[in-house]
């Protein structure tokens, strides 16, 4: 202790000797303090920063703050007593009796503001470092520094983030106004729930979100290039690094050249800006968040995506639809709710160029490939999507989301997101991108085709069944046929089916339905309309209304089905009114060998033949959602075996 004191005195002496002639102090000690007069200031050794009393804007109140010393426009970067202004010029900034740095006023014994840490020594000293960091030193260690208690500004060299060890989380709080440094309604900092993201809050409610770090940048930071800001190129003068490890999570900026003055400031109106001092003696903005409508947190609600380039801005994600289409506000609900995941034939559609959804309920798999990530996602019913996160890591590192998707937007520098969807959306997406799928790998092909094949064949069976039924009504037949042909019912992707082993590729007799027709007829493949599973995939009850508007009666097989005690219809028990229904049931027999081939189906339906009796169906009739249990169809070979296998 004695030694320390001696050292301190020596340092003081040297300081006095060297800088005594200067008006500004370099150190604050028990005997050296700053009073609110023209000489009262502390300057960093490089002269870049100055600490002293000031009055902001039009205000008369006095505050202790730090500002850039070499800049003509007074720019305050830190304020000590921001909540306890001094109304006269009797303020003093000094080391108090307890060793803390404190603001006193008016001969009062208790401070207006204090660093308020426990000081492990009787002597302590404060110094303003070249970075603009005010440090309190005792026993040669820094026991407090202003960089840990920022006000509205982040300076280069400052670690802005969260210390997992101490629990200290840096938060910027805007000034109330340019005349009042009192904490305003905006604040910002890292949110450490799930994957760290930078948040801007308005009255503690999320207002903007950065998205996770992607190795180069925060994923949702607005594209700098798209601002067309005159000084955007200056952003290159600053390097930004992000660190996330077991000890801390922080972001840090450092100028590439020492002479650049820059700062990140949360302004009183809630704008978070990066600014650089320009030779023309003014601050220029190089980056800003909340620069368009889509930046606003959850502008479009959950499970929606915001797009600045469209008139409406907001749209529901694939697999979701507007709950109240007539209302002005958007609320997206799932089109078909499954007990787990997205049901049979589910998969993922890629959304390009997006800001990742809120990752507070997401999980980072730092060494998973995209394929591994997809498998991981399919393991959980709750997983809603996944994405590759690091742009430079050769596809390693992914995030999976486990809750509703919030705050997505499109923008140019966004990344790809894989959204979990049901069979219908997958088929629609496949149809949209038919060309792409032809060159897809086999495994991809399988997962795209599954729903299509299922759809197609279910529809085919029932279409022919219906047509057969209609044969007697010859007057209407011609008209109906025309209508069906007008529909040009072709599924693009069906063409991409590989020719089967028997060489019987493409069944020219097939009348293909547009997917939308099939979707409508099966009420979005609703489980209520699902009869069970046949050799070709799930079999759905279709409503003829959707096939031909004039038709009033529904084509329902289920009405004829009785169930045995175990819930499986015993087909052989039924008596059939016409051969069409019979063919329909033949299509779903348990034993694949018993089922008619496609060409047989067509033959049976178009000719009066003696039909064999159907045997037991391959499915128990179930209407519950349990039917569509966890489906990992993509990795399943079963489907490959069922594609147009001629018998
Ligand atoms: C400021 O310092 C100068 C020179 O040391 C001194 O003459 C002057 O009185 C000081 N002003 C105040 C208000 O202490
Ligand atoms: C503070 O106290 C000193 C003497 O103790 C006195 O001269 C001075 O006027 C007081 N200042 C204020 C602002 O009360
Ligand atoms: C110092 O900290 C204590 C407890 O952390 C708190 O009760 C007290 O108000 C603080 N004092 C000042 C001057 O900030
Ligand atoms: C995260 O999950 C919890 C619990 O399910 C939920 O209350 C919260 O709203 C979710 N947050 C986000 C951002 O999805
Ligand atoms: C990441 O995964 C690859 C392949 O599985 C492996 O070779 C590598 O060692 C892993 N790296 C780490 C850091 O775990
Ligand atoms: C899915 O989420 C619910 C509620 O948020 C939770 O109770 C359940 O354990 C989760 N299931 C899985 C498989 O993560």
Image (cartoon, rainbow, N blue to C red):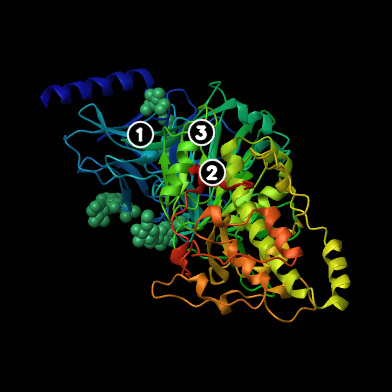
Q: Using the rendered view, name the quadrant where residue 501 is placed.
A: top right
Residue at 74%, 52% in the rendered image: 491
The mark that comes first in sequence, 2 or 1, is 1
Single out the mark in the foreground, 1 or 3. 3
Q: Position of residue 7 (x, y in %)?
A: 20, 21
Identify the mark nearer the N-term, 1 or 3. Answer: 1
Which dot marks residue 245? 1
Mark 1–mark 3 CB contact (< 8 Å): no
Mark nearest the camera among 2 and 1 is 1
Task: Tell me the residue at 85%/62% (across/down).
Answer: 485
Compared with 299, 170 (above or below) is above
Q: Say if disc 1 is inside 8 Å of ligand 5.
A: no
- Look at the numbered disc 2 and say if its residue's Cβ is closer than 8 Å to ligand 3: no
| Residue pictured at 44% horizontal, 55% vertical | 630
Q: What distance separates the C-alpha of mark 2 from that of mark 1?
A: 26 Å
Q: Residue at x 23, y 26 (%)?
A: 140
Say whether residue 179 is visible: no
- Callouts 3 and 2 close, C-beta under 8 Å: no
* Occupied quadrant, residue 471: bottom right
* Residue furthest left as drawn: 2
User: Looking at the image, which is closer to me, 283 or 165?
Assistant: 165
- Label ID, residue 390: 3
Identify the residue position indicated by label 2 in the image: 265
């Amino acid at each position: 202790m004695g030694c320390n004191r001696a050292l301190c005195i020596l340092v003081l002496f040297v300081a006095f000797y060297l800088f005594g002639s200067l008006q500004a102090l370099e150190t604050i000690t028990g005997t050296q303090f700053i009073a609110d007069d023209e000489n009262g200031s502390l300057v960093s050794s490089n002269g870049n920063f100055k600490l002293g009393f000031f009055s902001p804007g039009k205000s008369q109140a006095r505050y202790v703050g730090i500002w850039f010393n070499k800049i003509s426009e007074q720019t305050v970067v830190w304020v000590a007593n921001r909540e306890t202004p001094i109304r006269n010029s009797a303020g003093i900034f000094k080391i108090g009796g307890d060793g803390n740095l404190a603001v006193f006023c008016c001969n009062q014994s208790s401070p207006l503001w204090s660093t308020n840490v426990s000081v492990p020594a009787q002597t302590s000293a404060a110094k303003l470092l070249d970075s603009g960091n005010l440090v309190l030193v005792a026993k040669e260690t820094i026991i407090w520094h202003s960089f840990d208690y920022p006000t509205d500004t982040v300076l280069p060299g400052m670690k802005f983030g969260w210390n997992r060890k101490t629990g200290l989380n840096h938060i910027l709080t805007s000034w109330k106004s340019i005349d009042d440094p009192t904490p305003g309604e905006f604040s910002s900092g890292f949110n450490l729930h799930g994957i760290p993201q930078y948040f801007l809050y308005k009255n503690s409610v999320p207002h903007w979100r950065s998205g996770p770090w992607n190795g180069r940048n925060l994923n949702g930071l607005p594209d700098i290039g798209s601002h067309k800001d005159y000084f955007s190129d200056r952003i290159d003068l600053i390097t930004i690094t992000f660190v996330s490890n077991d000890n801390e999570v922080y972001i840090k900026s450092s100028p590439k050249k020492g002479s650049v003055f820059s700062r990140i400031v949360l302004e009183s109106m809630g704008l978070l800006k990066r600014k650089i001092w320009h030779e023309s003696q003014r601050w220029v903005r190089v980056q800003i968040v909340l620069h368009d409508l889509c930046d606003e947190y959850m502008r479009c609600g959950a499970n929606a995506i915001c797009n600045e380039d469209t008139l409406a801005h907001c749209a529901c994600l694939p697999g979701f639809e507007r709950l109240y289409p007539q209302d002005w506000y958007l609320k997206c609900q799932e089109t078909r709710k499954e007990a787990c995941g997205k049901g049979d034939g589910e998969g993922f559609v890629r959304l390009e160029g997006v800001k990742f959804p809120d990752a507070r309920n997401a999980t980072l798999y730092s060494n998973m490939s995209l394929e591994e990530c997809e498998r991981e996602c399919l393991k959980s019913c709750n997983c809603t999507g996944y994405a590759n996160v690091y742009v430079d890591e050769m596809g390693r590192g992914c995030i999976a989301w486990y809750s509703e998707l919030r705050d997505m937007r499109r923008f140019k520098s966004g990344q790809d997101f894989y959204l979990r969807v049901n069979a219908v959306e997958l088929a629609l997406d496949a149809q949209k991108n038919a060309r792409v799928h032809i060159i897809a790998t086999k495994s991809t092909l399988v997962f795209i085709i599954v729903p299509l094949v299922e759809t197609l064949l279910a529809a085919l069976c029932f279409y022919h069944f219906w047509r057969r039924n209609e044969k007697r009504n010859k007057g209407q037949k011609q008209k109906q046929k025309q209508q069906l042909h007008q529909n040009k019912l072709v599924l693009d992707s069906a063409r991409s089916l590989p020719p089967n082993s028997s060489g019987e590729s493409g069944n020219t007799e097939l009348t293909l339905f547009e997917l939308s027709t099939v979707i409508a007829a099966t009420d979005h493949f609703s489980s209520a309309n699902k009869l069970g599973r046949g050799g070709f995939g799930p079999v759905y009850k279709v409503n003829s209304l959707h096939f031909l508007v004039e038709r009033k009666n529904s084509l329902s097989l289920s009405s004829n089905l009785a169930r045995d005690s175990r819930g499986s219809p015993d087909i052989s028990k039924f008596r059939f009114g016409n051969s069409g229904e019979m063919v329909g049931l033949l299509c779903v027999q348990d034993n694949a060998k018993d089922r008619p081939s496609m060409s047989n189906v067509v033959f049976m339906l178009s000719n009066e033949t003696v039909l064999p009796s159907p045997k037991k169906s391959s499915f128990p009739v179930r209407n519950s959602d349990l039917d569509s249990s966890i489906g990992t169809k993509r990795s399943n070979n079963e489907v490959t075996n069922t594609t147009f296998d001629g018998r």
